[in-house]
């Protein structure tokens, strides 16, 4: 077997393994949805926090195993926009939405489609170096968006725009960002779209991996 044949077989094996992992993950999520009832939330909220499951362009065979599609179900920008956020948002509301570099423009469009305007952004500086075509990734952006007359934090209480935090798994965002948003808007009804795990006190989670008390 020559080198080309070895590489070809390795690609086939990687692809097969990725499909198996993806199928297993979908089975787990589908079972959880059947138990919890994956329904659009009721009520209205003043604070929104979202980490959309963006679908990414995959380049290179090695990148397939690291792509979002290999770890969890992704959604098209059209499907994400179709979520009826305006129906559950108060006239004065806040949105923090994560944007990967490939989907920065999409995230801005998403915020506008949901009725928000982008007013600032925060950067998560990671402790690990990722991949990238033009630049190797070491940060992600959280777009800060508002609608209506949502006020900024009181003078002297705004945090720095760049936050250093460890990575904790594929697409898992540091809890510090949610905690900061919670401190900015105490007492207001809050929801995390595409939230994972158990919702902390004061929050509602929505998503196929969400657990609400």
Image (tube, grey):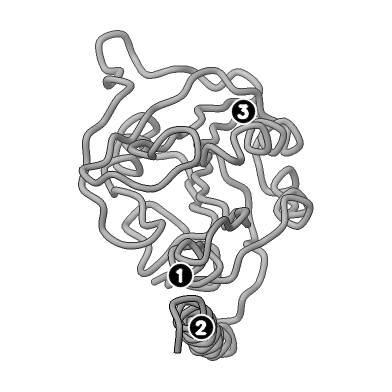
Residue 97: percent from left, percent from top: 53, 40
Is disc 1 in contact with disc 3, using a CB cutoff of under 8 Å?
no
Res 104 → quadrant: top right
- Viewer-side residue, 147 vs 208: 208
Q: Secondary structure at mark 2?
A: helix
Q: Secondary structure at mark 1?
A: helix
Res 27 → quadrant: bottom right
Residue 79: percent from left, percent from top: 76, 57
Badge 3 local density, few (<14 within 10 Å), some, or many (20+)?
some
Residue at which label 3 appears:
92
Residue at which label 1 appears:
65
Residue at which label 2 appears:
5
Q: Reading the chain from its start, which is encountered first: label 1 or label 3?
A: 1
- Do we see residue 25 in this rendering? no
Q: CA distance from mark 1 to mark 3?
A: 41 Å
Q: CA distance from mark 2 to mark 1?
A: 20 Å
Q: Reading the chain from its start, which is encountered first: label 2 or label 1?
A: 2
Is disc 2 in contact with disc 1, using a CB cutoff of under 8 Å?
no
Residue sitting at 27 percent across and 41 percent down? 126
- Do we see residue 209 in this rendering? yes
Residue sitting at 40 percent across and 32 percent down? 185
- Viewer-side residue, 140 vs 10: 10
Is disc 2 in contact with disc 3, using a CB cutoff of under 8 Å?
no
Residue sitting at 67 percent across and 61 percent down? 75
Q: Reading the chain from its start, which is encountered first: label 2 or label 3?
A: 2
Q: Secondary structure at mark 3?
A: strand
- Viewer-side residue, 120 vs 141: 141
For the N terminus, the quadrant is: bottom left
Residue sitting at 39 percent across and 27 percent down? 122
Q: From this view, report whether residue 173 is shown above or below residue 179.
A: below
Residue 205: percent from left, percent from top: 48, 61
């Amino acid at each position: 077997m020559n080198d080309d044949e070895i590489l070809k077989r390795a690609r086939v094996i990687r692809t097969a393994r990725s499909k198996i992992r993806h199928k297993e993950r979908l089975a787990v999520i589908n079972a959880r949805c059947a138990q919890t009832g994956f329904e659009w939330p009721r009520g209205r909220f003043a604070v929104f926090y979202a980490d959309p499951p963006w679908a990414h362009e995959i380049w290179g065979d090695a990148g397939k195993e690291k792509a979002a599609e290999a770890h969890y179900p992704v959604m098209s920008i059209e499907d994400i926009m179709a979520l009826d956020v305006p129906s559950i948002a108060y006239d004065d509301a806040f949105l923090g939405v994560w944007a990967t570099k490939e989907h920065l423009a999409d995230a801005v469009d998403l915020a506008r489609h949901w009725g928000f305007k982008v007013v600032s952004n925060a950067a998560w500086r990671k402790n690990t170096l990722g991949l990238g075509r033009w630049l190797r990734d070491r940060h992600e952006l959280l777009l800060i968006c508002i609608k209506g007359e949502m006020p900024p934090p009181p003078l002297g209480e705004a945090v720095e725009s760049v936050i250093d935090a460890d990575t904790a798994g594929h697409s898992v965002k540091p809890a510090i960002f949610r905690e900061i948003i919670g401190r900015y808007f105490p007492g207001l009804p809050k929801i995390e779209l595409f939230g994972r795990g158990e919702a902390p006190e004061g929050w509602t989670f929505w998503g196929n991996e969400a657990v609400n008390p």
